[in-house]
Image (tube, rainbow, N blue to C red):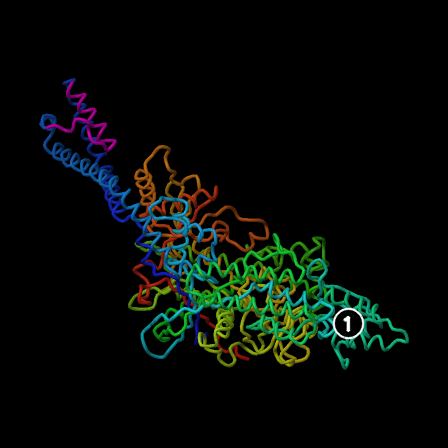
Amino acid sequence: MTYRVEPAFAVRVAGMPLAFLRRLRTERTAELVEQILDADQWLSEHGDALSDALHDVVGRTTDTGLRRRLINLRRDVFQGRQPRSGVDDELLTQLPAELAEALTDWQRRVHERGALIVAAEAELPAEVARQRHAVHELAADPAFQRGLVLASRDLYLSLRKASPDQPDRKLERKLAKYLSRTAAKTSPYSTFTGFAEGRWTDDGPQLHYAGGSRRSVVELNAFTQQQIPRALAGWPEIRPHLPLAVNTSVVEDGKVLRFLGHKDGEAVLELANTPTLQRFLREIRHGADRTYRGVVGALAGMDREDRSAQIAGFLDQLIDIGLVEIGFGIPDNETDHLGRLAAELAGFPGDRVADVRATLLALRDDLETYGRLDAPESRFEQTAVVTDRLRQVYARLGWDDSGAEFPKQVFYEDVLITGGAVTGRLESWRGLFDQLELVRRMAGLYDRFLPGRIAAEAFFADRYGAGAQIPFLDFYRDFGRAAGNPADTGSRVSGADLATCYERAFPVPQIGLERLDRLAALQQRLVAAVAEAPVDDAGVRHLSSRAIGEFLDQLPDFVSPIESVACYLQPIAGDRPRAVLNELMTGSGRSRARLLRLGRRTGGEAFAPPEAATAPRRYAEITGTVGSNLNLKHPLTHFEISYPASTSDRPPDRRLALSDLLVVHDPGAGVLRLVSKGHGVEIMPVHLGVMVEFLLPPAYRFLIQMFGQAVPRFEFIKQLSTAAPADEVDGVRRYPRLALGDLVLNRAAWVVPSGLLPRRAAGGSALEHLIEVNRWRRRHGIPQQCFVRAVAGHGNASQRSRVDGLFDKTRKPVYLDFGSELFGHVFEEVAASTDQLLVFEEMLPGPQDLVPGEEDGARATELVVELTQAGRDD
């Protein structure tokens, strides 16, 4: 077997049962609308034949009065409306018997349609009133309101003041969107979603989910949390006692010293490697007392006269540019950051320190109190307490707490599901995982970083020579200079082409490199093969596992499968495992690293500790959170790359300094490798935080993009799904569902230009609009329940490299129910948000497809399953 399934998987569970959304339907009106449209369809289908038959009769009739009555009748039949005076028996006797019988049947159907209209007009207002009450009843759920407190403070306040007896369409529309988000989606990093751990087993049911209790984990904004100790490190009563360290990226090159520092942002800086600078660095690295005061004192003691002030000033400059680092030594992934900082401050003198320490401890208690509160109104009040306390911290630090200086989101909350059980019988899923393995291998062809690596290898070989090796920082500097200069680099790859391959790798740049030409041709072959796959009567394009496998077997060596992928799957209930693939990301424990840390914050019972050797020994995660809660995680890899301005609690022998890393050219394989000088092994950097790679600091991103694990470009699934020309009706393009065995790769989709959407007619009634919108929906086969995204455009050139045209994710999908008058208003809001395109996508799994779970009903559930290439454990 070419892959293994990691034994544990993450589970994301929606905050409400999906069935709750049924209460937001105007159910009876929706049924009547469907019957009206059925009647319209019947009248339309039979009206043409009747009109033609009447035309023949009119042509043979010489009686002027009868002829006029027949012409009027024909006009009414053609327009599908009830004749003003009806079809009387006298008139019917003038017609052939078969035509008279058909007209009688037609008149009956017209009358029935009229009765349906009357019934719907009477039903809709009553259902809208019931719907309004249902919105308020669902929104009164404490768990929903707890999420709303953080997600939308203004909406929560409006809800508290609103009455279900007083219509407020704007409020109801906003609540409907949040309720549908809570019930129909597994939104990440939100109090509307719960996180649990699952395990694969050797026996038992194919998938079993028993919900447990929900536990809140609350944490201060990571960027703010990071800045507090940095500010305190400048206090005169603290600074002298703090330890110093030399930036781990320092490379000495004769008379020049290079390092990754900060000057108007992150940058490679160079300083003259003077004897004075060497003395400073030597004392910081090897001195008896490596604190700020100890280093200043030792250096001052080397001179006959006391130059402590000048020495301290120069040292401050080195700290400011990042060559020297100072801090409390608190690891970036510390689970109790505020508590640890307060403990460190206890050893420093002065009332000011004692005051800020007390305030930080109070802030810590305020956050813990918030997590223990159940009542939404108590939580709302506690948010003000936390915010005011943080403002007190700002005041004590001398910070401006107005405008952009104060965090918009003071703290974040995650909800862990503990005490439950999620298990799956591994062998029953093996067939579906075999299909996922094909996707893992296919994704290597669409590694978003591969074109940049191919171009970088050519640039490296031409600049330094085949088989050369140079310090990582030097290559990073030279690459950046070349990519920033569009002129000729003296290489096969110009600066402009180098930048294009690095930043905008889709479609594959054609710059004269043979490997890039082959990569583009292979992608085109796969697209063509998918386009030829048949579409069945149910509108599903089925790919052949054998054909895909044979194609993948022919890929060249430079196109490698993604070593480890996290597959985001929504299971579909049935007698065998079926699932929809929502997303692909890198694996190596990335899907669980953040949750493991959250579990540690709850005492460790939520998630089991990782197994030994979770990732191959050559994998190395990178220190630091980049000031984002998304990157707070539990350590998983054997090695860690020490990134400047970050702190680790790893043993020194497992930390790799940036200065320890060499870039080595392998001319045989035609690749660049990252090697640790100290350990003599190739290193693969991995990003195990959840922040997307493109938002990482430049050198961090460069490490991942050039030498890290390949990152699957999930948009390739969208490209394959649109490989064949769409079925197009009146400008609306329909793309079929794409399936590989029991794995749904892509849901059916409809792409609609904004100008073709049905609009509410001026002066028209709510029922008339509901009928016309559903007439349009039925014409194009769009399901009654679905999701819609507004596409406002494709962004700038850099963004266009990371999205797939009309299938970009510039807007989040919004749940729609065309059987709900309320969601009709949601649809209008989404339609009004763009003048470009709307993309509708089928809802799969639907309410009938969900795996049974918690006692109050089945919920939308997503499994995050990791597949890893077999034999890559060393």
Q: Position of residue 374 (x, y in %)?
A: 42, 65
Q: Quadrant of residue 652?
A: bottom right
Pointer 1 local density, CA inside 10 Å: few below 14, some 14–19, many at least 20: some
**Amino acid at the residue labelled 1:** Glu
Q: Is residue 854 visible?
A: yes
* In the image, farthest residue toward the right: 304
- The magenta segment: 65-88
- Residues 835 and 826: in front is 826
Asked if one can make out residue 468 in the rendered structure from this viewpoint, the answer is no
Q: Is residue 834 left or right of residue 332?
A: left
Of 385 and 839, which appears nearest the observer? 385
Residue 51 location, x and y as percent? 21, 31
| SS class, disc 1 | strand
Q: Does the stretch in magenta take in 72?
A: yes
Q: Nearer the viewer, residue 768 or 92?
A: 768
- Quadrant location, the C terminus: bottom right
Q: Position of residue 495 (x, y in %)?
A: 68, 56
Q: Nearer the viewer, residue 755 or 285?
A: 285
| Predominant secondary structure, magenta span | helix
| Image position of 458 with respect to 426: above or below | above
Q: Is residue 13 left or right of residue 19?
A: right
Q: Where does label 1 land, which residue?
A: 252
Residue 200 image point, x, y percent: 39, 76
Which quadrant holds residue 420? bottom left
Q: Is residue 682 magenta?
A: no
Give the quadrant of the N terminus. Answer: bottom left
Q: How many marks?
A: 1
Direction from residue 358 to residue 317 in the image, left or right? right
> What residue lies at 24% left-to-right and 31% top-to-bottom?
78
- Residue 698 located left or right of residue 23: right
